[in-house]
Image (cartoon, rainbow, N blue to C red):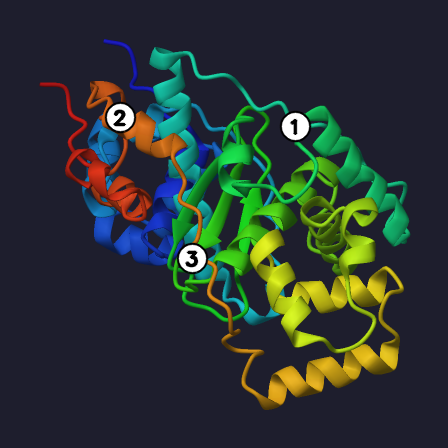
């Protein structure tokens, strides 16, 4: 009888989904910590009985351990120092499951792979103008019409990027991404009900995928570049520069917020970056906004955050291709899908 398929990386992934250490998993599965370590490193292979015990302890189907292990780096997280390793790894593991959903679904539905332009930065110390040009090239490659982008999430999903929304439960983590080669995953926070912020976060993560990919992550310069990319992607210089005020004109800024679907903070920063607003005027505006409480909650509501649709389509099929994934984690991934799909989001076993 052939040995069951077992990918060492899948054991680590399942353990991180449950926020367990190797020692804690060993105790639950009634094996030694050394054995868990050897299984995860690939030094030894568990028996069928051990695999079944690990599956019970980790609440995953035994088939989960045989799925291909598509590895990527630790992810583009903005505040590594202020997020716990356990929380970061669990969020990353959930993003892996979202990737699994699309990969397994794509095998049946022939979903196209991502077509993200790869435009690496010239170095870590780039100019804002370089990111401006990079963002313009992406808009051109994707044939984005001039003016505000109607739906950022829909745009990136249309080019093969998986987008999910999760309650990240941290003021220091708004979003992150994993650069899988076939279907990169972008995770947006669902606990911050801010459309403008969510659009900027999605554009920021797109910047990472375009500029950084697998090559570099976890550095302040990398985050700055992604931030500059997002601003240019959402508010192209040659289109918005003359619209921006040179003084603190809240009425005009409110109008621009509605038009471009970005935050007041982003507009003020853009006005300063593009030389429309002096440093002194910018600081005056920021202080005024802070005094009014606008740094926490801005005025001028522009609607709910954009909703992902790609995973919704995958889960709507109700096919059996997701039987190897843990039900509760798929339910977590599906929790932020549009309303009509909620009844079908977990019903995915073959009938």
Q: Residue at x 19, y 36 (%)?
A: 346
Residue at the spot of label 1: 116
Marks 2 & 1, CB-CB < 8 Å contact:
no
Find residue 316 and report its horizontal and vertical position in percent. 24, 27
Please give left or right for residue 72 compared with residue 242 in the image: left
On residue 29, the disc is: none
Q: Residue furthest top?
A: 1
Residue at the spot of label 3: 303
Q: Nearer the viewer, residue 102 or 153?
A: 153
Q: Is residue 52 visible?
A: yes
Helix, strand or loop at disc 2? helix
Find residue 278 and report its horizontal and vertical position in percent. 88, 75
Q: Residues within 10 Å of mark 1 (few under 14, many from 20)?
A: many
Residue at the spot of label 2: 322
Q: Residue at x 49, y 76 (%)?
A: 297
Report which quarter residue 265 is drawn in: bottom right
Please give left or right for residue 157 compared with residue 316 in the image: right
Q: Nearer the viewer, residue 270 or 180?
A: 270
């Amino acid at each position: 009888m052939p040995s069951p398929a077992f990918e060492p990386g899948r054991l680590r992934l399942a353990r991180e989904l449950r926020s367990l250490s190797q020692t804690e998993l060993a105790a639950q599965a009634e094996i030694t910590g050394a054995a868990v370590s050897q299984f995860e490193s690939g030094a030894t292979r568990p028996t069928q009985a051990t695999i079944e015990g690990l599956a019970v302890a980790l609440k995953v189907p035994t088939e989960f351990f045989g799925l291909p292990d598509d590895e990527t780096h630790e992810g583009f997280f903005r505040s590594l120092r202020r997020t716990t390793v356990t929380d970061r790894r669990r969020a990353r593991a959930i993003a892996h499951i979202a990737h699994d959903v699309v990969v397994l679904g794509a095998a049946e539905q022939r979903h196209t792979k991502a077509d993200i332009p790869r435009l690496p930065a010239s170095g870590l110390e780039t100019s804002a103008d370089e990111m401006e040009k990079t963002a313009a090239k992406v808009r051109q490659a994707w044939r984005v019409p001039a003016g505000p982008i109607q739906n950022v999430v829909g745009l990136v999903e249309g080019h093969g990027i998986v987008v999910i929304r999760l309650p990240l439960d941290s003021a220091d983590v708004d979003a992150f991404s994993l650069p899988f080669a076939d279907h990169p995953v972008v995770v947006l926070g669902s606990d911050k009900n801010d459309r403008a912020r969510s659009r900027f976060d999605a554009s920021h993560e797109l910047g990472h995928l375009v500029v950084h990919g697998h090559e570099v992550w976890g550095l302040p310069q990398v985050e700055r570049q992604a931030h500059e990319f997002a601003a240019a992607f959402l508010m192209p210089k040659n289109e918005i520069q003359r619209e921006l005020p040179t003084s603190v004109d809240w009425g005009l800024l409110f109008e621009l917020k509605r038009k471009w679907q970005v935050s007041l903070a982003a507009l003020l920063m853009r006005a300063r970056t593009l030389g429309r607003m002096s440093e002194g005027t910018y600081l005056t505006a920021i202080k005024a906004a802070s005094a009014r409480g606008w740094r926490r909650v801005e005025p001028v509501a522009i609607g709910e955050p954009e909703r992902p649709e790609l995973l919704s389509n995958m889960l709507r099929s109700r096919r059996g291709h997701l039987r190897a994934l843990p039900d509760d984690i798929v339910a977590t991934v599906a929790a932020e899908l549009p309303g009509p799909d909620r009844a079908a989001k977990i019903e995915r076993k073959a009938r």
